[in-house]
Image (cartoon, rainbow, N blue to C red):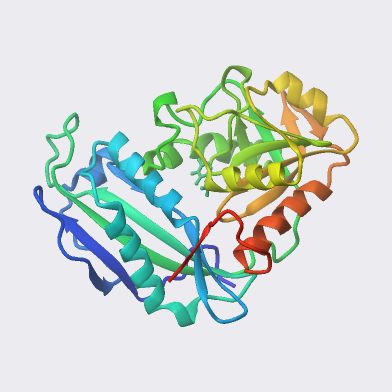
Amino acid sequence: MSAFGSVFMPEMAISWFDGSQWSDTDVVSSDSLQLHPGAHVLHYSSTCFEGLKAFRHEDGSVKVFRMDKNISRLAQSSELLALPAFDEAVMADMIRDIVARFADEVPSPPGSMYIRPTHIGTEPAIGKAAVPSLTSCLYVLLSPVGDYFTGGDKALRLLLDDEGMRCPPHMGMVKSGGNYAGALQPIMKARAEFQADQVLFCPGGDVQETGAANFLLIDGNEIITKALDSSFLHGVTRDSILTLARDMGMDVQERELSVEELLERSARPGCEAALSGTAAVLTAVGTLIYQGKEYPVGNGGIGETTLRLRRALNDIQWGKADDTHGWLTSI
Ligand SMILES: *Cc1c(COP(=O)(O)O)cnc(C)c1O
């Protein structure tokens, strides 16, 4: 199987905003996009994106998971980047239509069709470093993906970084390109120096998230994660897992979690930690690395509650459990 997100369906849905109105949605080849080299996005990072998935159910139907929530997050990201507003209902049609067009290509579980709506500022205006792009382009790419966990489901090693930050605090809730490029150096350094898989950003000792996933601490019946504020990305998977945890009667705590409390709780037997995100669903964290020292989380392996929550979410996505929260959209 190729690397996650490197295979694309041959066509994508696209719409252009010319400064006053959006074009009708078009379906075009997905192998190129014509842009002026001076386009605002290429210089000033006026770009945001989403990541959601469509799943094939046993009866052959295809369902998109939490589409509305992802679309409203794209609208919010666009607003925070001063990109032109778009009609969320039109975006929903773009997603539904392009997924329907490639419905036969949606892999069966544990695979899925990864959907990547993207919004970019297209105005050719390199003088607009401090001015929004008047024109923009929205497109929806599709990428069939296999089982994220093939090749072994290993618990991750995370380096705790309490000095740097992933991105400026007011950009945390924006799913925007520059945030990822900006976090690469600390992540590469953590890989080279500590063989860490990811960096867990904890600015000023406040446990936040990694480069592209939210962090959850599971201690017995308690599940602890940072309360929503503008400094980090409000994951749809985070929200879904917390909802399922509440359904199971767990004590869900959305609050500040300090590095000190994290390390103290991690040492307890039975403690678990996990990363949540659309791509990896819920991935176990086995080791925390802080100030050159390694701290196993619980027994250092993959926790039972982590697996139970992941399965509960997959069961809904795959049509094996009732969609009691109305998270699936038929196409
Ligand atoms: C996308 C993303 C997440 C996870 O969000 P989901 O909606 O669960 O996929 C978490 N953190 C960052 C920084 C992200 O980019």
State left or right for residue 238 relative to residue 36. Answer: right
Residue 246 vs 289, above or below: the answer is: below
Q: What's the residue at 61%, 29% (across, down)?
A: 226
Image quarter of residue 26? bottom left
| Count of marks placed on residues | 0
Can the viewer see residue 146 in this picture? Answer: yes
Which residue is nearer to you in this view: 328 or 36?
A: 328
Which residue is nearer to you in this view: 193 or 98?
A: 98
State left or right for residue 10 relative to residue 66. Answer: left
Q: What's the residue at 75%, 61% (across, down)?
A: 152
Residue 79 vs 21, above or below: the answer is: above
Q: What's the residue at 50%, 38% (across, down)?
A: 234
Q: What's the residue at 37%, 68% (across, down)?
A: 96
At which x and y percent is residue 135? 15, 48
At which x and y percent is residue 136? 19, 50
Quadrant for the N terminus, please. Answer: bottom right
At which x and y percent is residue 248? 75, 46
At which x and y percent is residue 233? 49, 37
Image quarter of residue 80? top left
State left or right for residue 63 relative to residue 22. Answer: right
State left or right for residue 230 relative to residue 238. Answer: left
Q: Which residue lies furthest to the right in this view?
A: 269
Quadrant for the C terminus, please. Answer: bottom left
Which residue is nearer to you in this view: 270 or 197?
A: 270
